Image (cartoon, rainbow, N blue to C red):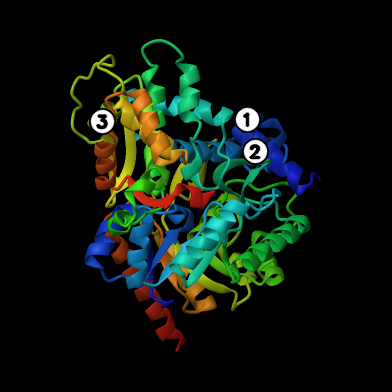
């Protein structure tokens, strides 16, 4: 997987990417969108995979749930991995379901030793089932549990150390969580050991008023903001030149706008490493 | 301190069962009420669920309008939350829910439109299959035809409605203004399938429908011809076979007794 910035693949761009093979370093696709037995999406991704490096990024495995891992979901993920042979494979440090009921959102965990042991075991189960390492992504969050005794970065680094997974560091999610919960973004970066991070995510967020206070929402519907670009610079300095992804999921713009965001990330990567050298 | 499982159960009860008190007690307020923080996730969960249903049921969305669709989808989510991390599976029971909601009156047809849209999604996501090997079929002794067992294309779904559900779907799936269509303009029997990447709706006669339904149930060619003829004495098995092979609806065959 090249360290150059890639773009999140969305169905609106399937035809353009297949027919025009635009200059994009790599694509990341949501795993569940290509779980089908057959059909147009699966066919499209097969063609795209023939021309580009690919990452698969899951949103529905519910890794942190105390339910048993869904064997059907895991089997479909395994099939997608065999079909598309992604260079990177990632999931979220979150949960979405219990008692078989799915919320279909990425819910934060309580950062406790119990949850850390549980998630580490689950990540190891998934890696065993797939026969490969996965990356785990930090999520945006709008609430914290009173019982948390660890910081989010201690928890994430702890799961990676215990399970042997890598880390997908979502820089925008760090910024959103830091603003919403009042911690310093740089504490998060410094709390993650160098060498664990294998991918960065960048996206835009929105702001809403709630009870007279502002809260940031991980909306993925706007350009990356200046503060997040600055945090990205710091992340590249600390963790090195790993693949970076531009994500955009609502009000999806043209591929040219996404490529411009990717070019901006590439310019920051290049400048940061020129300085380091 | 509650166990992780107890915490997760309280949070899901708060998000999907409108019982927020247990979850609220577990969440830090930190300047914003815990209930408000939980509500952000409730809104996300609702939005994600509704958008998934909207993508599966675009014609239903257009027929009933955004407000009614959202309200109905939220109420449906409370009764039938998603049981999978793959949102393509959310909404499988939506047509049954609508059928119970509108068991009589002018809106009974909505459940049939929803049922058709669910089958269309299944068809669009089904396995592909190569066309029937006609030269191989030509090698079969005609005396053995009765025992043949045909395989239908994996994307084929059969659907029968007392309403013109297929015409409603076809005239509402695009952006153009749909023509006026009377709900009493006649029912339809349909074979929904994918052919060369495109969705096709084939109108079926009563005999053709019974014939394909019998093949789908795994019965032999002879038994299926009997089913077709029983449903419609005018059913012509030769024409039917030609039509469904040409449409790529029949994609494989085996001698019936070799499968037993």
Foreground: B244 or A99? B244
Residue A124 is situated, as x and y percent measured from the top left of the image, at 68, 66
Mark 1 touching mark 2, by CB under 8 A?
yes
Is residue A79 depicted above or below A106 in this figure? below
Residue at point 25% right, 43% down? B242
Marked residue nearer the N-terminal end (2 or 3): 2
- Secondary structure, mark 3, is helix
Whether residue A62 is visible here, answered yes or no, is no
Chain of the residue under label 1: B
Q: Which residue is mark 3?
A: B172
Which numbered marker is on residue B12? 2
**Res B210 → quadrant:** top left
Marked residue nearer the N-terminal end (1 or 2): 2
Marked residue nearer the N-terminal end (3 or 1): 1
Q: Is residue A66 left or right of residue B243?
A: right
Q: Is residue A111 left or right of residue A2?
A: right
- Secondary structure, mark 2, is helix
**Res A204 → quadrant:** bottom left
Is residue B159 depicted above or below B260 in this figure? above
Which numbered marker is on residue B17? 1
Chain of the residue under label 2: B
Foreground: B4 or A194? B4
């Amino acid at each position: 997987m090249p360290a150059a910035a890639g773009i999140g693949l969305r169905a609106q761009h399937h035809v353009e990417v297949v027919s025009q093979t635009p200059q994009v370093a790599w694509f990341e696709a949501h795993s569940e969108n290509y779980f089908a037995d057959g059909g147009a999406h699966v066919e499209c991704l097969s063609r795209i995979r023939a021309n580009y490096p690919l990452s698969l990024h899951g949103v529905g495995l519910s890794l942190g749930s105390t339910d048993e891992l869904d064997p059907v979901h895991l089997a479909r993920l395994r099939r997608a991995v065999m079909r598309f042979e992604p260079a990177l494979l990632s999931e979220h440090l979150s949960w979405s379901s219990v008692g078989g009921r799915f919320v279909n959102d990425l819910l934060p965990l309580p950062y406790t030793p119990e949850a850390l042991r549980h998630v580490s075991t689950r990540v190891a189960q998934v890696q065993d089932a797939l026969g490969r390492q996965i990356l785990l992504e930090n999520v945006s969050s709008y609430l914290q549990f009173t019982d948390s005794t660890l910081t989010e970065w201690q928890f994430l680094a702890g799961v990676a150390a215990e399970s042997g997974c890598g880390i997908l560091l979502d820089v925008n999610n760090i910024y959103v969580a830091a603003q919403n919960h009042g911690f310093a973004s740089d504490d998060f970066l410094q709390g993650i050991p160098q060498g664990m991070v294998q991918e960065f995510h960048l996206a835009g967020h929105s702001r809403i008023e709630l009870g007279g206070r502002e809260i940031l929402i991980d909306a993925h519907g706007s350009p990356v903001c200046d503060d997040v670009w600055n945090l990205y610079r710091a992340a590249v300095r600390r963790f090195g030149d790993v693949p970076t992804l531009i994500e955009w999921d609502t009000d999806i713009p043209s591929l040219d706008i996404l490529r411009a965001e990717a070019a901006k990330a590439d310019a920051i990567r290049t400048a940061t490493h020129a300085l380091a050298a | 301190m509650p166990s992780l499982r107890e915490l997760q159960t309280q949070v899901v009860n708060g998000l999907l069962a409108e019982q927020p008190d247990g979850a609220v007690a577990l969440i830090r307020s930190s300047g914003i009420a815990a209930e408000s923080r939980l509500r952000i996730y409730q809104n996300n969960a609702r939005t994600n669920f509704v958008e998934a249903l909207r993508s599966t049921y675009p014609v239903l969305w257009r027929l009933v309008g955004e407000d009614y669709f959202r309200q109905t989808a939220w109420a449906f989510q409370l009764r039938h939350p998603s049981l999978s991390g793959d949102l393509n599976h959310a909404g499988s029971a939506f047509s049954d829910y609508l059928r119970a909601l509108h068991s009589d009156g002018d809106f009974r047809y909505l459940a049939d439109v929803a049922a058709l849209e669910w089958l269309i999604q299944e068809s669009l996501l089904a396995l592909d299959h190569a066309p029937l090997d006609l030269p191989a079929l030509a090698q079969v002794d005609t005396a053995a035809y009765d025992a043949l067992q045909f395989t239908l294309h994996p994307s084929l779904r059969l659907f029968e409605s007392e309403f013109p559900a297929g015409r409603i779907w076809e005239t509402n799936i695009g952006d153009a203004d749909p023509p006026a269509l009377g709900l009493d303009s006649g029912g339809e029997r349909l074979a929904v399938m994918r052919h060369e990447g495109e969705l096709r709706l084939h109108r079926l006669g009563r005999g053709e429908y019974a014939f394909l339904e019998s093949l789908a149930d795994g019965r032999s060619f002879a038994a299926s011809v009997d089913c077709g003829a029983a449903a419609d004495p005018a059913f012509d098995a030769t024409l039917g076979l030609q039509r469904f092979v040409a449409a790529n609806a029949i994609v494989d065959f085996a001698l019936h007794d070799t499968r037993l």
